[in-house]
Amino acid sequence: MDYVLQLVCAFVATYGIAIIFNAPKSTLIPCGLVGMIGWLIYYAMIQQQVDSVTASFCGAFIISIVAHYQAFKHKTPMLIFVVGGIIPLVPGGLAYEAMRHVVANEYNESLQFILKTGIITGAIVMGLVIAEVLVQMYRKMMTRLKKAKTLN
């Protein structure tokens, strides 16, 4: 039951962000699914005691791959799916805790939260970038194979 609630909340959050960013109506449900899939990966890894940095990387990687597929399928830019899909992974709670400790003049505690937030954010970015590079490499390879077939 916990997984169902997590997935529904991730879908609703991503769907809502897609509406706020004026995503085309035909892409709202796929946007929600992209975020839900990314959160499923993240949440399942967290439940298996995997570090949140690794889980965030994997979730972002999968979001980027699925976003590329959806972009191809719907003939829209990939960013439509990535921007909404990544929202559930953003470490907003950690950033809040960091700022709360700064306001309370508890700088040592805030530094720990700031560093963890930065590391998780970097992991998300790396997941997106590595997936993008792999997709571009795959596309180039497929283009070369098609050219080779037409020459033969």
Image (spheres, grey):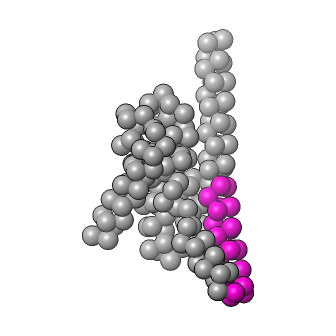
Q: Is residue 19 visible?
A: yes
Viewer-proximal residue, 29 or 93? 93
Q: Is residue 24 left or right of residue 141?
A: left
Image quarter where the N terminus lies is: bottom left
Viewer-proximal residue, 141 or 131? 131
User: How would you classify the magenta stretch by its main secondary structure?
Assistant: helix
Q: Please determine whether, in this image, residue 38 is positioned above or below residue 52.
A: above
Furthest residue to the top? Answer: 151
Q: Position of residue 12 (x, y in %)?
A: 36, 55
Viewer-proximal residue, 110 or 119? 110
Q: Is residue 68 visible?
A: no
Q: Is residue 121 magenta?
A: yes
Q: Is residue 115 left or right of residue 51?
A: right
Report the span colored magenta: 105-126
- Say which residue appears at 61% left-offset and 12% top-offset: 150
Image quarter where the C terminus lies is: top right
- Say which residue appears at 61% left-offset and 47% top-offset: 131
Q: Please determine whether, in this image, residue 14 is positioned above or below residue 91.
A: above
Viewer-proximal residue, 151 or 57? 57
Q: Position of residue 18 (x, y in %)?
A: 44, 45
- Say which residue appears at 44% left-offset and 31% top-offset: 73
User: Residue 29, located in which quarter of the rendered image?
Assistant: top left
Q: Position of residue 20 (x, y in %)?
A: 45, 46
